[in-house]
Amino acid sequence: MPGVFSALLREKMSSRSEEDLSCPVCHDIFKDPVLLSCSHSFCRDCLQSWWREKQT
């Protein structure tokens, strides 16, 4: 369902400042954004890197 998440993220971003459009991990404007069910947003690569590096 990536299309649904992208649509929700675009809606969320429509009235936000540049700071609100920045990934909290890399601090750049979102690249291939992912919206989590908790309403937090990240770049897809940042999220995937975090999951790969996360210790269980």
Image (cartoon, grey):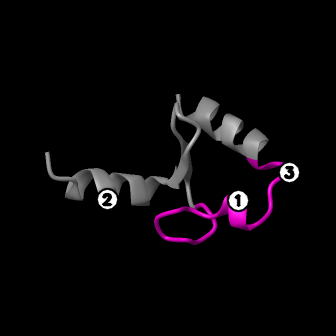
Decide: is 35 above or below 29.
above
Label 1 vs label 3: CA separation? 9 Å
Label 2 vs label 3: CA separation? 28 Å
Per the rendered image, the range of residues in magenta is 13-30
Q: Give yes or no for residue 25 being in the magenta stretch.
A: yes
| Whole-percent x, y for residue 8 in the image | 69, 35
Is 53 on the left-hand or right-hand side of 21? left
| Whole-percent x, y for residue 19 in the image | 71, 67
- Amino acid type of disc 1? Asp
Image-quadrant location for residue 3: top right
The mark lying in front, picked from 2 and 3, is 3
Decide: is 34 above or below 16.
above
Which residue is located at x 55 percent, y 54 percent? 32
Q: Earlier in the sequence, mark 2 or mark 3?
A: 3
| Whole-percent x, y for residue 11 in the image | 77, 40
- Circle 3 residue: 15
- Amino acid type of disc 3? Ser
- Amino acid type of disc 2? Ser
Decide: is 2 above or below 17.
above
- Circle 2 residue: 49
Is 42 on the left-hand or right-hand side of 19? left
| Whole-percent x, y for residue 29 in the image | 64, 67
